[in-house]
Image (cartoon, helix red, strand yellow):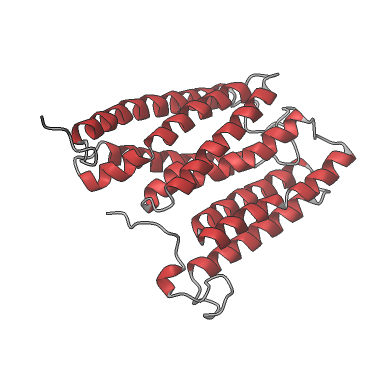
Amino acid sequence: MAFPNPFARDTEGQQRNISAYKVLTILSWLLQFVYTIYVSISYNHRGWFGHNHGHPAATPFTLNGIFVEIFWIVLYIMQIVYIWHLFSNREHFVNPAASVGSHFILYNFLQFLWVFCWTHGGLYLFALIILIINFFNLLSLYLRHATSPRLIHLATTVMPLTFNFFMIYWNGAVVVHAYGHLVARILANIAIWGVLVYALFFLVAFKDYYVGFTTSYLAFALAVGQLGTKAIALQWPFAFTIAGLTFIASALAAFPGIFGENTGLEGSGRRGERAPLLQEDA
């Protein structure tokens, strides 16, 4: 009697999984994409990203809405390209895309739930809980698939994870009603430096300057948002400082030769070891 080899590749099973990933990926992405666009249009008159200062979104961690919208336009374009990779006939495109499929599908559903809770008054605590769950989902994706091709790494991991991190600050500030109280402002002035710690962690531990540049952009969006929310305050100068420091640190990691060889971030290894542990896109 012949027994199946337990170490043989289950090609048929893999094909079924990939087919399921394709269906669930496109459905989950369309769900959150269509709903987000619908909400953005519906709330345009009062700014669901905090354009209107009467909206509870105006906190010490409110990002500038225009910068956020540009961020999401770029992210959606990259995610469309990622989905195209998943539906490609080329195996070297499909396999890396499918490997992150389960996390990306969960991310889409949680993102949809967060937008729903965020845009319905009184559900901010539930929105914060969803953000925290999604943060650990994306962090797990990052740690498990740190060598994904650049486009997949950016579209499914770096940009969603970093935006999620900023939204935990923003949503958390709404939950604790950190709108104008002096104590809340002082605590916010301290907590904002966690953004720099977040970026430096990925720069030092993984040499991932993609996280650094993304954090720098969103920190700049935070600075502009705070400048428009409360001009006489420390939050926006701190945010500009963090954006600048993060950008410089990311540039040092990405292009160590600009300021000389011994920048302190590149380590003692070869030049190729300074880059994030990413595969090249085919």
Q: Residue 146 at x, y = what percent? A: 44, 51
The structure residue drawn at horizontal position 19% and vertical position 38%, both measured from the top left corner, is 5
The structure residue drawn at horizontal position 83% and vertical position 48%, both measured from the top left corner, is 232
Q: Residue 264 at x, y = what percent? A: 59, 74
Tell which residue pokes out farthest to the left in this image: 1
Q: Is residue 264 above or below residue 275?
A: below
Q: Is residue 92 above or below residue 65?
A: below
Which quadrant holds residue 114? top right
Q: Residue 265 at x, y = what percent? A: 56, 70
Q: Nearer the viewer, residue 16 or 200?
A: 16
Quadrant for the N terminus in the image: top left
Residue 74 visible in the picture:
no
Q: Is residue 247 left or right of residue 279?
A: right
Q: Residue 28 at x, y = what percent? A: 41, 26
The structure residue drawn at horizontal position 51% and vertical position 76%, both measured from the top left corner, is 268
Q: Is residue 227 left or right of residue 186?
A: left
The structure residue drawn at horizontal position 55% and vertical position 63%, both measured from the top left corner, is 250
Report the number of numbered marks: 0
Q: Is residue 105 left or right of residue 280?
A: right
Q: Nearer the viewer, residue 226 or 133?
A: 133
Quadrant for the C terminus in the image: bottom left
Residue 243 visible in the picture:
yes
Q: Is residue 233 above or below residue 180?
A: below
Tell which residue pokes out farthest to the front in this image: 1
Tell which residue pokes out farthest to the right in this image: 182
